[in-house]
Image (spheres, grey):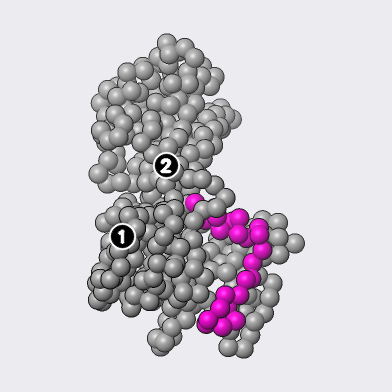
Amino acid sequence: MLKFGALPFWWGFFMYKGVKRVLDKHEKWMAIAIKEARKGRGKTYKNPLVGAVIVKADRLIGKGYHASYGDVHAEVNAFQNVSNPEETKHSSIYVTLEPCAHHGKQPPCCEKIVEMGIEHVYVAQLDSNPLVRGKGVAYLEAHGIKVTIGVLEKEAEQLNPAFHFFHRHRRPLVTLKQAVTIDGKTNSSAASRTYLTDEKTSEDVQQLRMGSQAILVGSETVLIDDPALTIRSNVVPYPPVRIVLDRRGRTVDQKFQLWRDGLAETWLFTGNEPDINFAEHVRVFVDPDWTTEKVIRILAEEGIQSLCIEGGAAIHDAFLAAGKVDRIVSYVAPYLLGGNARPAVASKRQTDALTAFELSHVEQLKEDVKLVYHRREADKCLPESSERSVRSLR
């Protein structure tokens, strides 16, 4: 097994230009595989985004990606797109994630790679799932296939931040989303909603939701907004689970659309068994003493890899206090509210602790500004965390 970039020092001394050309070639093919992988965004559910490119004699002969949950994997899709299957003999394949060697909804990709006569497999990164990590590489090498790991590894990590985080930490990646004024306020009063952001921000929020497997709000948000918590901009086969934290059961009323519309699976976390019959899309979890740790543990047991918390202020603070906020996406509108307007994060707890976050992305969305922060000790595979990016700030 070769680690990409691990070359003898004397290569750089005698053959610098040649080595540079070879490395660029491999990166070029892997970049195409990464582009292919992105085509599956919003469709692969709990499976990672994966792309594959097949190359022979420096010529692309097939490419593919994992198109949807339960569908064929990227490697098989790439083989299906080769016009002449005989060409795959003694060719190379570039894959953004380690090929699987286990039986799941699809047969092992490694077996197909061996069957098709591939000579060299270039892998951007190993699988982060400890149950399968390294097994694909071991299978390929046991069958005489060369394997090189690490081609555009950092770029490939960015494809599946929640997938990697979940398997490394055994809990979902938690994003706190807020829309605030310049002075950090969300509403003018506790009993009403103040509309702050514009349509461009609304579109971006839809993309944020599409990248989440669950959306969570507190009872206050349901009582004030009666939200749908759906993805309106795209029809997705696996919409995020909608979660309501309502310990006192204040939202247990059929008038709220979440309990009636059937548009997505909806979970209620409450302190007592409700006295009404909910529709089939609603699941109820009962515990008289809910904590953020208990909620996170249940989501992890259910396989939820990414959670977007959309409010309100007390819910935001509870997850912050528990140390369970990994990323913050803040949409700042060009207004001030001042006075006793509601802050984005608040509760009655006393604290002087500072939680350190690092600014990783700034983007202007028409009149609003999008700020993305990630917790400094969180995984470096979090979205936009590999380097600071600033877009169209004027």
Q: Which of 343 and 158 is in front in this view?
A: 343
For residue 393, side relative to residue 272 (left or right):
right
Residue 356: image location, x then y, percent: 47, 72
Q: Does the magenta stretch include residue 184?
A: no
Q: What stretch is highlighted in magenta?
A: 186-210
- Tell me the distance, in whole angstroms, between the alpha carbons under discs 2 and 1: 23 Å
Q: Element under label 2?
A: loop
Q: Which residue is drawn at 64% across and 82% down?
A: 337
Residue 74: image location, x then y, percent: 42, 31
Q: Does the magenta stretch include residue 188?
A: yes
Q: Quadrant of residue 342?
A: bottom right
Q: Name the residue under label 2.
A: 44
Q: Element under label 1?
A: strand
Residue 19: image location, x then y, percent: 53, 30
What type is the residue that disc 2 sits on?
Answer: Thr
Q: Which of 386 and 78 is in front in this view?
A: 78
Characterize the local packing of mark 1: few (<14), some (14-19) or many (20 or more) Cα atoms within 10 angstroms: some
Q: Residue at x 66, y 59 (%)?
A: 199
Instruction: Please report contact status of discs 2 and 1: CB closer than 8 Å, yes or no.
Output: no
- Residue 137 is at least partly visible in this image: no
- Disc number lying in front (2 or 1): 1
Q: Mark 1 points at which residue?
A: 283
Residue 388: image location, x then y, percent: 58, 58
- Residue 352 is at least partly visible in this image: yes
Q: Residue at x 52, y 82 (%)?
A: 190
Q: Which of 11 and 137 is in front in this view?
A: 137
Characterize the local packing of mark 2: few (<14), some (14-19) or many (20 or more) Cα atoms within 10 angstroms: some
